[in-house]
């Protein structure tokens, strides 16, 4: 009986011993994996062991995951006094905005109130730094490296994107508004004039107020020059509206005389019909695509809601089909008996009723009648064939036809 009790007692001791060992090992491993400084010290110690075991711990001794680093830094900044933490985080934000955002997110999960306090201090530092930079640039002539870089970035991107960015940031970012004059001092004259010309009226006035004396006069003169250039292009559009299509094709159907940007302004101010008549004579699809892009840019810069390019394309297709049919009729009438052709011509000249029309936005912009069709056909015929037909026409009709064909 005593032996049985001894066996049970020994078994209990063994079980308790095993449990204690398991608990101890769990605590050791838990402490090892959860407490990074201790883990690093243990890894460094075990790295001294010979063979592959030591090599393994040597490779992991200094290994710290990115998330662990961020967590450590977040806890560290939370533990600091708010002004000190703000100074350090401001430096991080200037060099790595993404890391700053990730640290703030982690810090916020630790202490939202402390993090909010630090964020406010960082913003105060940014605002005071912007003011200092503005004053320094004004004294030194605006040659700051930061503002120069920002100027190059803004004038290096699409003008529409730049204007939208400036308008948005002027409304939402006080620091940007303060540094904008310094940024603009580093822009080239043409880009600056274009930005101020197309930018929102209220933003333009605010920008101009930020400059004084000779600087403001120089900018206003550039703005006046830009306005004069655009007025000239609008006036040219009025002239081309009246010119024969063939002449207009030679002058504004390519980039020989005007840049694609200038042509965008000209075509944006032509009537849909005139633009379609000119472009329907061209076979350079690449030019037309570039022109459409330029027109749309001009429209967007001027806040035009409906683009004229869709209407021009619709009218172009109509004109191409119409011209193709007229060319076919030229062939038909050229082969027809002159006496018979003269009878048809006289009859069609008397009919001015609309046969069909090109309609844009419920408004007819190009109406076709029998009279207009036959005039277009005869105007494209060879002189000999046309002369044979006129010889068989009534004298009064022939005289009227001659006048109609002579019209530009």
Image: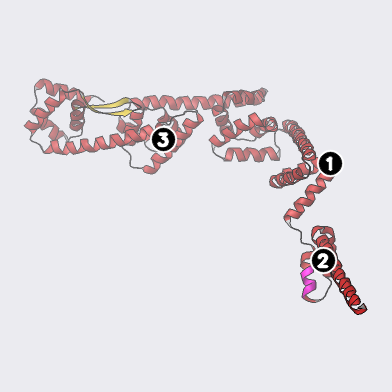
Task: Name the secondary structure under disc 3.
Answer: loop
Q: Is residue 61 left or right of residue 210?
A: right
According to the picture, the residue beneath numbered tag 1 turns out to be 84
According to the picture, the residue beneath numbered tag 3 turns out to be 257
Q: Residue at x 18, y 26 (%)?
A: 371
Q: Quadrant of residue 159?
A: top right
According to the picture, the residue beneath numbered tag 2 turns out to be 43
Residue 305 appears in the figure:
yes
Q: Which residues are magenta?
A: 52-57
Q: Which of the two discs, 3 and 1, labels the residue nearer the N terminus?
A: 1
Q: Position of residue 191 (x, y in %)?
A: 57, 34
Q: Mark 1 and 2 residues: CB-CB less than 8 Å, in contact?
A: no
Q: Looking at the picture, does residue 107 appear above or below residue 18?
A: above
State the predominant SS element of the stretch in magenta: helix
User: What is the crowding at mark 1: few (fewer than 14 residues within 10 Å), some, or many (at least 20)?
Assistant: few
Q: Is residue 352 left or right of residue 82?
A: left
Q: Is 366 within the magenta?
A: no
């Amino acid at each position: 009986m005593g032996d049985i009790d001894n066996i049970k007692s020994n078994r209990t001791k063994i079980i308790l011993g095993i449990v204690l060992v398991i608990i101890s090992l769990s605590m050791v491993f838990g402490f090892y994996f959860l407490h990074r400084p201790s883990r690093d010290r243990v890894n460094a110690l075990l790295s001294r062991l010979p063979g592959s075991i030591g090599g393994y711990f040597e490779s992991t001794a200094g290994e710290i995951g990115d998330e662990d680093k961020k967590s450590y830094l977040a806890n560290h900044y939370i533990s600091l006094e708010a002004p000190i933490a703000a100074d350090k985080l401001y430096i991080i934000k200037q060099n790595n905005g993404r890391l700053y955002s990730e640290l703030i997110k982690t810090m916020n999960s630790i202490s939202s109130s402390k993090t909010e306090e630090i964020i406010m201090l960082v913003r105060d530092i940014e605002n005071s730094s912007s003011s200092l930079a503005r004053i320094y640039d004004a004294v030194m002539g605006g040659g700051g490296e930061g503002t120069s870089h920002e100027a190059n970035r803004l004038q290096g991107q699409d003008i529409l994107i730049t204007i939208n960015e400036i308008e948005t940031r002027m409304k939402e970012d006080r620091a940007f508004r303060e540094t904008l004059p310094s940024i603009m001092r580093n822009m080239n004259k043409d880009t600056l004039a274009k930005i101020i010309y197309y930018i929102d009226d209220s933003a333009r006035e605010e920008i101009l107020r930020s400059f004084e004396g000779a600087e403001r006069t120089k900018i206003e003169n550039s703005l006046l020059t830009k306005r004069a250039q655009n007025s000239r292009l609008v006036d040219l559009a009025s002239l081309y509206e009246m010119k024969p299509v063939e002449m207009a094709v030679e002058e504004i159907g390519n980039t020989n005389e005007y840049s694609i940007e200038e042509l965008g302004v000209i075509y944006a101010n032509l009537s849909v019909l005139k633009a379609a008549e000119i472009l329907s004579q061209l076979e350079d699809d690449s030019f037309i695509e570039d022109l459409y892009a330029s027109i749309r840019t001009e429209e967007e810069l001027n806040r035009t809601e409906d683009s004229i390019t869709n209407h021009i394309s619709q009218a172009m297709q109509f004109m191409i089909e119409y011209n193709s049919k007229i060319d076919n009729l030229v062939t038909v009438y050229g082969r027809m008996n002159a006496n018979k052709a003269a009878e048809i011509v006289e009859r069609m000249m008397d009919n001015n009723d609309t046969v069909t029309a090109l309609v844009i936005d419920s408004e007819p912009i190009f109406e076709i009648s029998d009279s207009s069709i036959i005039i277009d056909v005869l105007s494209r015929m060879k002189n000999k064939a046309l002369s044979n037909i006129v010889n068989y026409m009534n004298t009064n009709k022939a005289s009227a036809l001659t006048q109609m064909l002579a019209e530009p």
